[in-house]
Image (cartoon, rainbow, N blue to C red):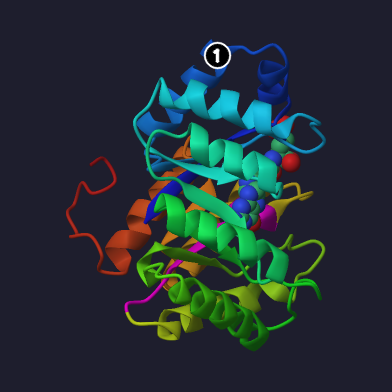
């Protein structure tokens, strides 16, 4: 499983403060600790409500890539900030994300094709987030078809079924699992899958417990990558244990220490 670190996000108060004061060391220490904890990709998000998002994204990307040598996921709904992030990166990025909305696909798939980027496809469109697994798959198929027309390899596509907070949309938990298990059949070779794991526990008291339990279920349904906190040691242990139980990693008595 590919662990994508969620921590370089202006949503976190400490990160927002570091962005405001252009504190390179804080961001770089955070990046290094995430990679040391096992992150294979770092998600980079300026946070909501910044008015100079392209400038901040450029600063974040440059600051992070001066400290670590991993792929970056450029996480923003703003096209200008996305373009700034893709251009500032010195290697191929993960575009996070397009939706099935025509205006987004029309800009972001050509951007991915031009720069050789990987791209996350969120299963939502002008009508919002679908209510069941089949509608999520329909939107996934629309996006995969459009990407293929531009020559984007299906293995560069990460389908995101959109995890919702259990407190607000409890019925969606199993529907996301069902959608995940259907995604593999959409193309050959199969696209990858990704979720924003911590969404599930937003505004709950038992955040890490819910994140850990759901991650094991998601992995059992074929999840390839998750935006999550690699500094949660117990959560990382769930990743390792699940990889062994799903026969993806060889069992050994000391696998958790490895
Ligand atoms: N899919 C994709 N990208 C995504 C998401 C997704 N990016 C954003 C988000 N969802 C995943 N990242 C986070 C990052 C932080 C939190 C949740 C998801 C989070 N932060 C604390 C909070 O809001 O309570 C911050 C509080 C603090 O300051 O400590 O929960 O689904 N493709």
Quadrant of the picture in which ligand 1 is shown: top right
Depth check: give the residue in front, 110 or 92.
Answer: 110
Q: Assess disc 1: are there few (<14), some (14-19) or many (≥20) residues with their C-alpha within 10 Å of its C-alpha.
A: some
Q: Where is residue 234 in the image (x, y as percent from the top left)?
A: 46, 44
Q: Position of residue 199 (x, y in %)?
A: 68, 54
Please give left or right for residue 199 compared with residue 64 in the image. right
Q: Can residue 173 be seen in this view?
A: yes
Total count of labels: 1
Q: Give the position of the N terminus as an image quadrant.
A: bottom left
- Give the answer, above or below, for where 87 lies relative to 196: above
As for residue 112 lying within the magenta part, the answer is no
Please give left or right for residue 249 compared with residue 217 in the image. left
Please name the residue shown 66% across and 39% down the image: 81
Q: Is mark 1 on a helix, strand or loop?
A: helix
- Give the answer, above or below, for where 58 lies relative to 19: below
User: Which residue is denoted by mark 1 in the rendering?
Assistant: 24
Please name the residue shown 74% across and 63% down the image: 166
Depth check: give the residue in front, 225 or 128.
Answer: 128
Please give left or right for residue 49 compared with residue 232 in the image. right
As for residue 194 lying within the magenta part, the answer is yes
- Tell me the magenta residue range: 189-200
Q: Is residue 120 visible?
A: no
Q: Where is residue 201 in the image (x, y as percent from the top left)?
A: 69, 53
Q: Position of residue 242 (x, y in %)?
A: 37, 61
Q: Give the position of the C terminus as an image quadrant.
A: top left
Q: In which quarter of the image is residue 57?
A: top right
Depth check: give the residue in front, 25 or 115.
Answer: 115
- Give the answer, above or below, for where 80 lies relative to 249: above
Please name the residue shown 39% across and 47% down the image: 237
């Amino acid at each position: 499983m590919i662990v994508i670190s969620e921590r370089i996000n202006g949503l976190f108060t400490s990160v927002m403060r570091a962005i405001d004061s252009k504190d390179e060391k804080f961001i770089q220490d955070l990046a290094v600790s995430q990679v040391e904890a096992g992150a294979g990709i770092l998600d980079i998000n300026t946070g909501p409500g910044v008015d100079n998002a392209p400038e901040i994204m450029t600063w974040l990307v440059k600051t992070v890539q001066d400290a670590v040598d991993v792929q970056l996921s450029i996480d923003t709904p703003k096209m200008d900030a996305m373009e700034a992030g893709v251009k500032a990166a010195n290697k191929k990025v993960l575009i996070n994300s397009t939706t099935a909305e025509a205006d987004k696909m029309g800009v972001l798939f050509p951007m991915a094709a031009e720069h050789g980027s990987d791209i996350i496809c969120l299963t939502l469109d002008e009508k919002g987030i679908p209510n069941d697994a089949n509608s999520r798959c329909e939107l996934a198929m629309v996006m995969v078809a459009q990407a293929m027309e531009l020559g984007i390899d299906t293995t560069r596509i990460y389908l995101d079924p959109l995890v919702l907070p259990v407190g607000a949309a409890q019925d969606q938990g199993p529907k996301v699992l069902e959608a995940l298990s259907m995604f593999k059949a959409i193309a050959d070779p199969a696209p990858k899958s990704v979720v924003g794991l911590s969404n599930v526990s937003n505004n709950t008291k038992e955040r890490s417990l819910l994140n850990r339990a759901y991650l094991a279920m998601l992995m059992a349904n074929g999840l390839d990558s998750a935006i999550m906190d690699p500094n949660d040691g117990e959560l990382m242990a769930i990743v390792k244990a699940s990889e062994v139980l799903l026969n993806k990693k060889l069992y050994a008595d000391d696998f958790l220490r490895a």
